[in-house]
Amino acid sequence: MRKLMEKENLADYAVKSTETRGRKYPEAEHPLRTPFQRDRDRIIHSTAFRRLEYKTQVFIYYEGDYYRNRLTHTLEVQQLARTIARALKVNEDLVEAISLAHDLGHTPFGHKGETVLDEIMKKQGYDGFEHNSHGLRVVDVIERRTSEFPGLNLTYEVREGIIRHATSYDLPKRKGLEEFTRFPAPSVETQIVNLCDEIAYTCHDLDDGIKSEIIKTADLKGVALWKEIEEISREECSDPGLKRRMMVRNFINYLVTDLVEQSRKKLKESGMRNVDEVRELKSGLISHSAGLKVKHTELRKFLEDNMYFHYRVIRMAQKAARIIKDLFYAYLEEPGQLPPGTQTRLKKEAKEIVICDYIAGMTDRFAHLEHQKLFDPHTLV
């Protein structure tokens, strides 16, 4: 029955749950849920997913309650990806699972935390740290749901989506991951999540930047894409707060509509008959139109110059870097400071790996409190 429904409702190039490459550890099928629905549920119930609520997107949690965090960002990506998946007739359940898992490997304090851990691990003689490969480690090894096997035992297709996550700021590591990277391109579903991640963080970073007054709307007058959205939103509202929200809404709609229309054309012209043919392509099939790509790049450059390198954001990032470095080297000098459950791993694994995993799993709040406990003599341990 499910096979017939997917054949009727999904495009030829979509991933079918009945044709999954399966799990590392075989499990019986569920009578009510597809394999990708089960993966989605396992991700939602994982510890790593819950921790996203207190992990930085741009602003550290104590800067304000109304800024985006990793969890709200993840939910925005999921929402956009499902809409696009439905429009393009690909697997919504798979897109949803990949969306929910795509940031599980992120450290506390956003990309700065990842950069610092990468530098530290390279100095310790390892390959470094990269959040996609760590995200795969989270679902394959660190999370536990049964005594029968490690990890969440997700399907190949969701794990592929985690490791092949790529945006302007994320370049996946390939060494040692040939199981997923031997193909030139990932599934259409993975490509959709990658583009939705860019749409989500561009739009909500812009919204948060204006809300925080780091970005002034007057400074955006020279940005082509902003001017187009401003023209669309001109007659809608005179209240500045509502106007900002309406512009962000129109901005998202503008980007999503262009992505669907352009991708529809490319998918039709490609003549792809199955997902294996999609994976053999040298470039992806999900993309914006050429004109919008140029405008989007201009806006991202504006955000880099005016928000990501703003002195307030840099101060937050440097504070985060000091916290992570202090914690890592304090644990390295005396691993006995680690909690008992983490210390048991030291008997089987290198202490640098154990410490890296422990810090990467921290929320911003926990890392900050742990730093106080270790370095502030007036804080109870």
Image (spheres, grey):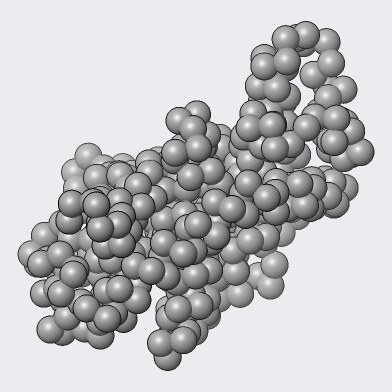
The residue nearer to you, when weighing 206 against 214, is: 214
**What percent of the width, then of the height, locates residue 117?**
45, 71
Number of numbered discs on residues: 0
Left-right relation of 343 to 64: left
Q: Residue furthest left?
A: 147
Image quarter (top left, top right, bottom left or bottom right) of the C terminus: bottom left
Q: Nearer the viewer, residue 242 or 166?
A: 242
Would residue 277 be seen by someone viewing this image from the given angle? no
Task: Report the residue that reaches farthest toward the bottom.
Answer: 125
Is 348 placed left or right of 22 in the picture? left
Q: Quadrant of the N terminus?
A: top left
* Residue 358 % position (x, y): 28, 66
Which residue is farthest right? 222
Looking at the image, residue 357 sits to the left or right of residue 117; the answer is left
Give the residue drawn at x 18%, y 60%: 144
- The residue lying at 41 percent from left, 87 percent from top is 124
Relative horizontal placement of residue 245, taking residue 294 as reference (left or right): left
Mark yes or no: residue 321 visible.
Answer: yes
Picture coordinates of residue 363, whole percent (x, y): 35, 51
Along the line of sight, which residue is nearer the eye, 352 or 88? 352
Residue at figure coordinates x 79%, y 48% from the top left: 302
Query: Residue 23's spot in the image, x, y percent?
Result: 28, 66
Q: Residue at x 85, y 36 (%)?
A: 219
- Residue occupying the far front of the picture: 378
